Image (cartoon, rainbow, N blue to C red):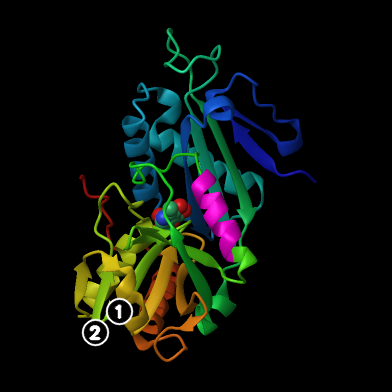
Amino acid sequence: MSRIIHLSGEYLPSNEARIDVDDRGFLFGDGVYEAMRALDGTLIEGDAHLLRLQRGLAGLEFQLHPAVDSAALSSTCLRLLELNDLKEGHALVYLQVTRGVAQRSHHFPNDPVQPTVYASTTRFTPPRELQENGAAAITQQDQRWKRCDLKTINLLPNVLAKQHAREAGAIEAILLRDRVVTEGSHTNVFAVLGGVVRTHPRTAEILHGVTREVVLSLAGAAGLPVEERAIDALELPLAEEVFLTGTTTDLIPITRIDGRQVGSGRPGPFARMLLERYLALMRDAAPFPQVLVRSR
Ligand SMILES: Cc1ncc(COP(=O)(O)O)c(C=O)c1O
């Protein structure tokens, strides 16, 4: 049976959904998205994801519209979990908003149009093996624009980076702006250097990951020294540990970068401890520590 998706106010089988060829998401990539985890029918950090979506809409200068109200979007996601029988276990919720349908022209439509809202859900299997044993990554230049804090559907540099990682037998491409480690193609990057947990600060060069925030607060609560300071590519070979965070990643230790061993070559103690605490939070299905996507 085809899964049920949501498209601009309607719930329907995915194979019956039709996107207008004049949709600005299709023509220009003019939109934003979120990928959220759900456990037993509860959205994990749903508020933080929806807040980031609202910031993205404002960043792309979308007009306010009731169709993209956070409460409405949240109930759409929960309804989809129900309709697809995903109220138990792990699921992934995808939510996308585009500027809507208008005759093609680069500038915004002259008359206000209704944004297109698309949401879907799928069952999700957490990457436990990678979390336990670690994985390989490559480095490559970050070819993206200057507003990586906006989670837009323009993902070509990320797509290419991830493909290159895959071809190299790695799970992720760690992106470098010149020599600065920004983030991964779909993850945030952490390193442990001299006993300090470091990650890129919250600037426009990175996506302000929801998981990143939770892991930073877990590290702080565990009494680990934490610093939001960019990592230089030359520091990577010196790192005791490197790990990635993200909605579909949770936390995955990186044990090889560009074929070179990281630290002991096994997941390190900080990564293991933070992963354990992160998974415990999710298992409790209790709301995570309040993660406020701080204003820039
Ligand atoms: C470029 C990029 N960085 C980081 C992340 C991790 O963010 P989050 O933890 O909110 O999933 C993502 C998630 O898709 C991403 O696309």
Q: Which residue is mark 1?
A: 192
| Viewer can see residue 285 | no
- Outermost residue to the bottom: 264
The span shown in magenta is 156-165
Q: Which mark is residue 222?
A: none
**Quadrant in the picture for residue 25:** top right
Residue at image location 33% in from the left, 42% down from the top:
146
Where residue 260 sits in the image (x, y, percent)?
48, 82
Label 2, ligand 1: CB separation under 8 Å:
no
Q: Is residue 27 above or below residue 104?
A: below
Element type where label 1 sits in the image: strand
Residue at image location 51% in from the left, 61% down from the top:
248
| Amino acid type assigned to the residue bearing label 2 in the image | Gly
Q: Which residue is mark 2?
A: 195
Q: Contact (CB < 8 A) between labels 1 and 2?
A: yes
- Ligand 1 sits in which quadrant? bottom left
| Main SS of residues in magenta | helix
| Amino acid type assigned to the residue bearing label 1 in the image | Val
Separation of marks 1 and 2 at Cα, in angstroms: 6 Å
Compared across the picture, whether 12 is left or right of 138 comes to right
Q: Is residue 186 above or below residue 56?
A: below
Q: Is residue 8 above or below residue 154?
A: above
- Between residue 280 and residue 176, name the one nearer to us: 176
| Viewer can see residue 77 | yes
Where residue 112 sits in the image (x, y, percent)?
43, 12
Where residue 249 sits in the image (x, y, percent)?
49, 66
**Quadrant in the picture for residue 4:** top right
Reply yes or no: does residue 62 show up in magenta: no
